[in-house]
Image (cartoon, grey):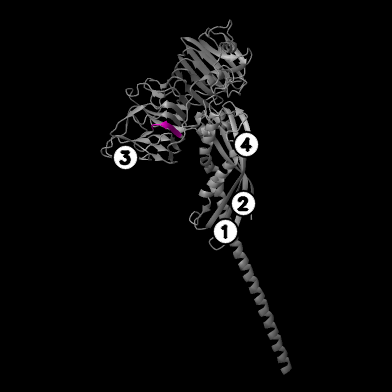
Amino acid sequence: MKKNKGIALVTALVLMMVLVAVIAVLTVQSLGEFRQSKDNVLAVEARNVAEAGIAYGNAMVRTRVSAMVTPLVNSYSGSFLSGGGDPSTSPVIPRNRWRNMGEAIQNGLQAQYSQLTNSDLDGAGRANLRYTVSNFRLAQLSSSGNGFTQVYTAEYTIKSTGRSNDGGRRRVVEKGYINITLGRPSLAQWLFLVEDAGGDAGFFGSGSVFDGPVHANSDWGFWGTPTFTDMVTSSDGGAWFWDLNGSCRDGMGRSVFMNASARPPCTQPDFQAGFNWNVPRIELPTSSLSQERAALGLAPDEDADGDGVPDPVTPSEYCQQLNITPCGGVPDGVYLINDGSRVTGGIFVQGDLDDLRLSATGDGRQVYRFNQGGRIWTITVDYVNDTTTIVYPGGRSDTFAGVPNGHAPLGTGGPTGQIYVNGDIDSVRSPQRTGWVPPNSPNHPPPAVIQPALSLETQLNITASGDIGIRSDITYECDPTMVGNPGYLATRPRCAAAAADLDTVLGMFSNQGNIDIMENGGMNDIYLWGSYMTAADGTGLTVENFNGRGAQGTMHLFGGLIQWQDQLRGIVNSRDGSLRSGYFENFQYDTRFSNSRLSPPNFPTTRAFQLQSVTAVPLVHQDQ
C-alpha cells in the first residue's frame, strides 16, 4: 500500500512538472507571439506614415517644381531670344546649365518639403523625406501650329522614412521621372490679362469673381472684396487700393498705390491662391499677320527674314490664294480658300463687314452668314459629310470637300478655323433669343432661350484688323462645364457622345481696335464664351454708352479676356455698390485653357519661351 502511494506521489509530481513545463512553453510562445504581433503593428503604423510621406512628396513634385524653375526658365529664355537662338535646333536651357537645373529642383524640394510632423499626421508619427533629382536633359524638340515646344526630363527619387510614436520605423522609396515642357503658350491660358489695368482710374470691386489666372503688366486697382481663386500677378511693384467712402485712412485719398495685399479695413481683396508683384512682363502681339496667313491657307509662322515676326502676305500670294486673275488689288468680298475641289484654308474677308452671324444647327453643321453692304454670303460647314458649301450673292453656290476647322499644320497651309477680316466688323451675333432671360440666371448652363453660336465640332478664331462689335450672346452648342452632368447630357445626345473630348472653342482678336459690346435694344445680361483679345494701345473690351445705357445685369464671360487697357463696363453706386449703368462682371475660367491644353486655332502666343507644364510620372515603389 505504501509502495502504491509512493508511485502515485511520484506520478503526480511528474505530471505536475510536465504541466508546468507545458504552461511555461505556452507562456513563452504566447509572449513571443504577442511581441511579434506588437512588432507587426508598429511596422504597419510606421509603413503607413512612410506612405503618407511618399504621397506628400509626390504632391510637392507635381505642384511646387514649377515655382522653383520658372525664374530660371525666364532668365534662360531671355538670353536665348536676345542671342538669336533657333528653338528648332538648340535648347532654350543651355546644356551647361542642365546639372544646375536638377540641383535647383532637388535643393528646393529638400529645403522646403522634407518633413511631415506628428501634428501633420494627426498624431500617427512623423516622416522624413530625402529627394534626389538627377540626369536633367533635353528629351524632345517638336513643332505645332503655335510654334516650337521643348521637353526636358530628369529622374527623381523620394525616400520617406516613417516613424510611429511607439518606436516603429519603416522606409518606402519611390522613383520616377519629371517632364518639364517649355513653349510659347497661348495667351488664351489666362482668364484675364492686361497691359494697363487702369487702377489709377478704376478698380475691380466687391462682387467681381475671377476663378482663373490673372495678370496685369501694370496698374491693378481694387476696391472692397473682389474674389480671386487663382494666382494674381503683376509686373508692377504693387497695386492701387481704393476707398470709395474716404473712411479707411484719413489724409491718404480715395486710392493709394501700395506693395501689399490689402488696405484694411476697407479694401481687402480675397486672394485665395496668393498674389505676386514684380513678375516678368507678358507682351501682347504687335500684328495679326499670323492669323491673316492662316486664313489664306499659308503657313502662319513663316519667317523667311528671321526677324521673329511672320512674313507679310505678298501681292502674288493674295492672287494665288484668292484666285485673282489678272493679279491686281483684292476686291471687297468674302473668300472661302480652296483649290477648286477642296478647302485649303479658312475664310478671308476684304473690307469692312456689316454683320457676321454664327449659327449651330444642332445636327453637325455650322453656318456663317456674312453681310457686306447688303451683299450676302452664306457658308455652311457640314462636319457629318466633311463638306463646305458657299452660297454667293445672287444665289450661285459651290460645294467643296473638307471643312475650315481646327489648327493649321505648320508649314502646310492646311484647313484652319480662321476667319480674317481686313477691316472692321460692325456686328457679330448668334440667332435671336427665343424668350426673356430671367434675372440672376446661373452661369451654367445658360438659359435655354439663348441659341448657340458654335456647333460642338467648331474650333474658330475670328480676327479683324479693326474694331469688332458684339450684339448678342455667343455660346457653344454643348456646355463644357456640364459634360459630367447626367441630367444635362440626357437631353443632349450629341453632347453626351462628345463629352469625353469636347473641344469646341472660340477666339476673337482685334489687332488695332476695340471689341465693343453694342447697345442691344435693352437686352439684359449677356453670355460671352471664348477668349477675347485686343492688342493696340488703349484698346480693350468696351461697352457702348456704359454710363448711360441703364443697368443691364451681368456680363457672364466664360473663357478669358486679354486687352491692352482695361475698360469701364459699368457704373456702381458708391453708397451701396449697386449697379447704376452697364454691366456687373462675372469672369469664369474655361479650365480646358489651362497650360494651353486647348486654345483657339492660330490664337496669339507669348513671344518668349515660358514654362508650360510640369508632370511627374512614378515608376517604381519599394519597401525597404
Q: CA distance from mark 3 to mark 4?
A: 50 Å
Q: Quadrant of residue 21?
A: bottom right
Label 3: how many residues lie within 10 Å, few (<14), some (14-19) or many (20+)?
A: some
Give the residue pinned by disc 2: 173
Residue 273 versus residue 177: which sits nearer the camera?
Answer: 177
Q: Quadrant of the C terminus?
A: bottom right
Q: Amino acid at mark 3?
A: Cys
Q: CA distance from mark 2 to mark 3?
A: 50 Å
Please provide the residue range marked out in magenta: 214-219
Q: From the viewer's perspective, is the residue at label 2 or at label 4 nearer? A: 4
Give the residue pinned by disc 4: 138
Q: CA distance from mark 2 to mark 4?
A: 26 Å
Q: From the viewer's perspective, is the residue at label 3 or at label 4 nearer? A: 4
Helix, strand or loop for the magenta stretch, by majority: strand
Q: Earlier in the sequence, mark 3 or mark 4?
A: 4
The location of residue 394, given as percent across then percent down, is: 53, 7
Residue 215 lies in the magenta stretch: yes
Q: Residue furthest bottom?
A: 2
